[in-house]
Image: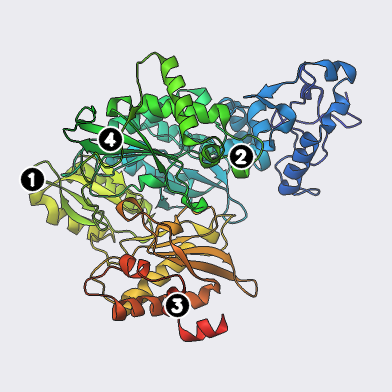
Amino acid sequence: MTVFGHQPFRTLSPHYPCRRTGHMSERAFSRWGKPKYTGCTHMSHTDAGFTAEQQEYLIGVLTKLNLHRAFTGGANGAASEPETVYGVPLEDLCKEEVAKHNLHPVDMWRQVEQWEAEGHLAAGLDQFLLRHLGFFNVEPASAGYMMRLRCPGNIMRGDQMSVFGAISEDHAGGYAHVTTRGSLQLREIMPGNIIPIVEKLQEVGLTAQGTGADSARNLTCSPTAGVDPQELLDTRPMASRLSLRILRTKELQAIPRKFNISFDGGGVISCVSDTNDIAFQAVDVPQNDQGIEPGVWFRIALGGITGHKDFAKDTGLACRPDQAVDVAEAMMRVFVDHGNRTNRGKARLKYLLDSKGADWFCARAQEKLDGFGTEVVLASLPKGIEAPRAPIDRQGHIGVQPQKQDGLNYIGVALELGRLSPEQMRGLGRIAMMYGSNDIRLTVWQNPLILGVPDELIATVQGELDALGLGTRATAFAAGAVACTGKWACKLGLAYTKQDALGIVRHLESKFTLDHPINIHLTGCPNSCAQHYIGDIGLVGTTAPGGGEGYNIVLGGGSDQDQGLARPLCGPVASEDVLPILEHVVGTYLSKRAPDQTFLAFSRSLEDEALKALLPAELVLAA
């Protein structure tokens, strides 16, 4: 049999058209006259014809213009009741939403098995769907797939870390990176390795599912939860339960866009909760005359997305800690029902809040809660009624720190921008099992903590870490240096952020000694995975004059009690000009600051025009 004049093709994905030929099989049509897109052997292989980007564009255009109706049976198809997805007509959906509608990512495992058996590297909309399972085609920036791990609450056991080190060696590029959401990533995963990785992760209770594309990403919480001397609340149970509920609920996966949730228990280390779509922030409410029951509550803030220049905004509402999982689910369901499915550039929660307002959103969430039958009611919590939050230690994630359990400590291990070798991962796992409580935490500052180390074993652990090439000390530049993957291994990256960050830290360390930390954030593109707008110094990759790699530089950002967006200093500037610029900026700060003034306070004391005085004179003249 032929299909529109062509020989039958081998189906790789039963829901997409051949993106090289543009043709569809007989299976491509539903009884409503809607095309269910199917695939063929041309779909993801490198071959003559259209590129993957061109193929995706053409599919989007055809769907948008309803040209598929020419194949749906004419009047009968036109007379059928239009099919919708959460109230959006099918023909109005963006191509990614069409793909998810035709094949939900949780239903694609048979397809993955077929690709793996054939040594096939998923591309186009196939790899978009696969990202929901945690595997990303990052070619040509890096060979094969990248995989991102899900670590709810930023927690791993030592035995899990050891297994992950072996996986990195046996099935990936032989290294891993701690991410800016307190998880781990592997790279250079060749086709044929997805299933072995998933099986080995599953054996030790780990998963990669829900770490990419339109998912509720890794749920973060205070990395010292349960051991922090100043925490109001141990947030681990909330992160664990919510992650499990999401992964066991189909409607909460493949949602309109990525979604970030964080639980801040008031601990000493920041989890930058105010940069999340939903921030649950523990507060202590004392005795009061406003009828609010004293105790620990979660204040709720919404819409954080600093790459789009917004922090999560306080809603004036709160819930009890044991209600947080239901509240999070209710809010996610409102987003699922009403999030933008036609324009991915406006699909994050921020834009729903901008359109409808936070009051509308919270009212819809309360309706969802009422439907659960759990009698959870969002409570009004006026600003200022709670006790002040205990201070955050900006270097509390590095070195030996006491736990609230007598005689025990956590040890923050200093990494170079999150990188770990297989030997180091196996070593960390062994140390955690032998000398600690088999408990490792990963911070958003891209480093691990080893918990439960007795006082008498601190020196032993430090010696073992030294033998692995790992330390427990970092300079005031290195401790807060954060960088995304960048152009080295991300197809969206416009600059080599990892390499440049390391060069910046080492250069500034050789020139200056600080008494207060300076956090430096480098992100490779405007998506801002490394959140450049909350760094003391932030750099975002761009194209430099002349066409090479470059950066825009911003100053004075912060989160939590220092919340504020960094302001532009200069850019675009070529990558090679960054070192002299930052040397001059830091040198000027040290020479002109008030006694004991932090870089953040100094930079914020300057008006926008006065920031230019921090630049080298020759750059000001050139500008």
Q: Which residue is mark 1?
A: 407
Amino acid tagged 4? Thr
- The first of marks 2 and 4 along the sequence is 2
The answer to whether one can see residue 182 in this image is: no
Q: CA distance from mark 1 to mark 2?
A: 48 Å
Residue 333 image point, x, y percent: 49, 26
Disc 1 on helix, strand or loop?
loop
Identify the disc placed on residue 235: 4
Colour option used = rainbow
Mark 1 Cα shell of 10 Å, populated few (<14), some (14-19), many (≥20): few
Could you tell me residue 344's position as x and y percent? Answer: 62, 41
User: Residues under labels 4 and 3: Cα distance?
Assistant: 41 Å
Q: Position of residue 250 (x, y in %)?
A: 52, 23
Between the C-alphas of marks 1 and 4, the distance is: 23 Å
The mark nearer the N terminus, 3 or 2, is 2
> Which residue is at the front of the view, 406 or 65?
65
First in sequence: mark 1 vs mark 4? 4
Up/down of 319 relative to 348, above or below: above
Residue at the disc numbered 2? 128
Quarter the N terminus occupies:
top right
Q: Secondary structure at mark 3?
A: helix
- The residue at which mark 3 appears reads as 581
At 48% from the left and 23% from the top, the residue drawn is: 249
Residue located farthest toward the top when viewing the structure as drawn: 373
State the mark number for residue 423: none
Q: Residue at x 17, y 35 (%)?
A: 286
Of residues 420 and 312, the one nearer the viewer is 312
**Residue 282 versus residue 246: which sits nearer the camera?**
282
Classify the position of the C terminus by image quarter.
bottom right
- Residue 302 lies, in percent from the top left, at 43, 39
